[in-house]
Amino acid sequence: MDKSWIYMWDGFLWLFAVMLARSREIKAYQVMGIALAGYLFAMTPLSYPVWWTIVYFFGTK
């Protein structure tokens, strides 16, 4: 699987997460957590800013 497939799947999962949030089945912050976790699991180039944000806010000080 090359990078274009990863971005396609990631885009589909974002769309799925947005549709879940709009249906009010789960809260918006839960949708964002699920979507950002998807970037971390895939370790795409977009996952590094997500990881740095998590370390900044929740890392040890």
Image (cartoon, rainbow, N blue to C red):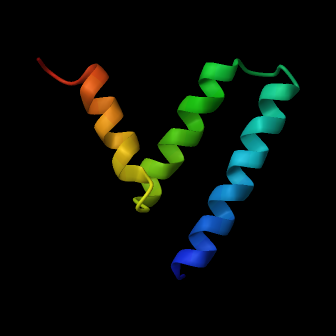
Residue 60, by quadrant, is top left
Residue lying at 57% horizontally and 69% vertically, measured from the top left: 6
Residue situated furthest left in the rendering = 61
Could you tell whether 23 is left or right of 54 in the image?
right
Image quadrant occupied by the N terminus: bottom right
Could you tell whether 4 is left or right of 24 in the image?
left
Residue 22, by quadrant, is top right
Percent position (x, y) of residue 30? 61, 24
Residue situated furthest bottom in the rendering = 2
Q: Give the answer, above or below, for where 38 lies relative to 20.
A: below
Percent position (x, y) of residue 3? 52, 76
Q: Give the answer, above or below, for where 44 lies relative to 14.
A: below
Image quadrant occupied by the C terminus: top left
Could you tell whether 55 is left or right of 50 in the image?
left
Residue lying at 54% horizontally and 31% vertically, measured from the top left: 33
Residue situated furthest right in the rendering = 23
Percent position (x, y) of residue 47? 41, 51
Residue lying at 59% horizontally and 31% vertically, measured from the top left: 32
Residue lying at 26% horizontally and 27% vertically, measured from the top left: 56
Percent position (x, y) of residue 46? 45, 55
Q: Give the answer, above or below, for where 55 lies relative to 38.
A: above
Q: Give the answer, above or below, for where 13 lies relative to 24.
A: below
